[in-house]
Image: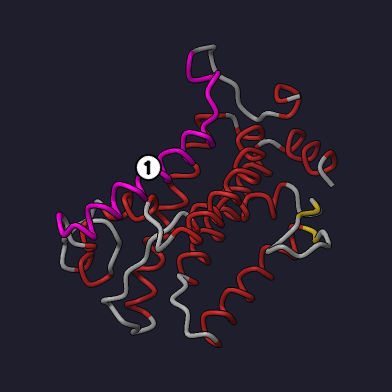
Amino acid sequence: MEMRYQISTGKTSIFSYLSVTFILLLINVLAFIIFTILIYANVIPIDFIAIKPANIFAGKYLWTFITSMFMHAGFFHLFVNMLSLLFVGSFVEKILGKKRYLYFYLISGILACLFFVLSSLILASDMNTFAVGASGALFGIIGLLVVLTPNLPVYVMFIPIPIKMKYAAPGMLVVLWLISVAGNVPIGNTAHLGGLLAGLIYGTYLRNKYKRKTKYISRHFS
């Protein structure tokens, strides 16, 4: 099935037999455990792991563009993101191919962090706010699916009724924003938006470059 709708294929190797989604999931879980132990044991400060606009603009801890993608604020945060990665990530991995999917995932996460940092400056928000999680990269995947499979029915936030992807994506952004405002919950809404925009842009690029394949994908998964 994978070979029928995959956009790109590569030479057979050990990498071709491994699930990138599973590897990313494993790295996220291990990183969460290791980083949590190191932080609570006062071995390293949270600034070493989480991205903070004040640090970035000061030219410090630039590697947090990467490490923040693999750290989560708690077990529930990790669980929800990994559950989402397992379902939507596995699906997109089959569409893009392993290497393209891995690059896209990482770039989406980095761009989401960059959007978070820049929006802190533009919106004059708190520069000392930390952000962690795979949500930016996940919203990149979601944005891609909005373009490639807009009518794909998905289940969102334990709602028992399937919703088309083109409605589910903006709906999730709005709901998360309302939760953060009403409940004063620290949710990285700008990072989510940045990831979604990255996915929309890349999805549009693929749709224009691979018109026949993306048209087939859209029709097959609707």
Q: Is residue 103 above or below residue 7?
A: below
> Tag 1's secondary structure?
helix
Left or right placement of residue 107 versus residue 181 in this view: left
Other residues around mark 1 within 10 Å, as few (<14) / some (14–19) / many (≥20): some
Give the residue at x 65% y 30%: 7
Camera-side residue of 199 and 183 = 183
Left or right placement of residue 154 versus residue 195 in this view: right
Left or right placement of residue 4 versus residue 99 in this view: right
217 inside magenta stretch: no
Write the start and end of the magenta stretch as one range.
14-43
Q: In which quadrant will I find the N terminus?
A: top right
Give the residue at x 53% y 13%: 11
Q: Which residue is mark 1?
A: 30
Q: What is the quadrant of residue 159 in the picture? A: bottom right
Count of numbered circles on the image: 1
Give the dominant element type of the magenta stretch: helix, strand or loop.
Answer: helix
Q: Is residue 24 above or below residue 52?
A: above
**Amino acid type, mark 1:** Leu
Give the residue at x 74% y 33%: 213
